[in-house]
Image (cartoon, grey):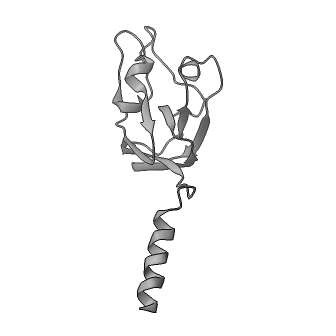
Amino acid sequence: MKHRLIHTLTAVFLTAVPWVATADSLTLTIPNVESSEGRIMVQLLASEAQFRGESPAYGAVQQSVTTGEYRLTFGSLPAGTYALRVMHDMDGDGKLNSNIVGMPTEPWVMSNNAVGNFGPPDWDAVKFTVDGHAEQVLTLNH
């Protein structure tokens, strides 16, 4: 009887504690990195203004890269709406190079694998929700 009461009280305590919060997180996976030259640059954007470049990104990461799969996890995020902008800066100059008509010449991708017509996709195409754990598997455009 005593053990049953202890297990019951423990179960009630564990299920009745709403203030125990879990950290929200986002895992980015890019399965098709074709070169180990340069670095991967990732921007985590938390608003349309950040997406348009009107304010700094919520978070940014630059890492050297190897061929194959690239994986990055952002932890301790507040639940909300986000977007990702990723480029493989192959020559290390810190920018996405483009040709004479403005088409990118380095690998890039945006969240949801969104692409635009005659320019970048809009905010509605790239945004996604983080509430708990979210994942984005993105394929670089070469």
Residue 41, image x, y percentages? 54, 36
Please tell me which residue is depicted at 43% across the width and 35% down the height of the picture. 129
Q: Nearer the viewer, residue 47 or 109?
A: 47
Numbered circles on residues, count? 0
| Outermost residue toward the front in this view | 1
* Quadrant for the C terminus in the image: top left
Please tell me which residue is depicted at 57% across the width and 25% down the height of the picture. 95
Residue 8, image x, y percentages? 43, 78
Q: Nearer the viewer, residue 27 or 100?
A: 27
Please tell me which residue is depicted at 51% across the width and 48% down the height of the picture. 24
* Quadrant for the N terminus in the image: bottom left
Residue 132, image x, y percentages? 45, 48
Query: In the figure, is residue 31 to the left or right of 81?
Result: left
Q: Nearer the viewer, residue 117 or 18?
A: 18
Q: Is residue 72 above or below residue 79?
A: below
> Quadrant of residue 46 in the image?
top right
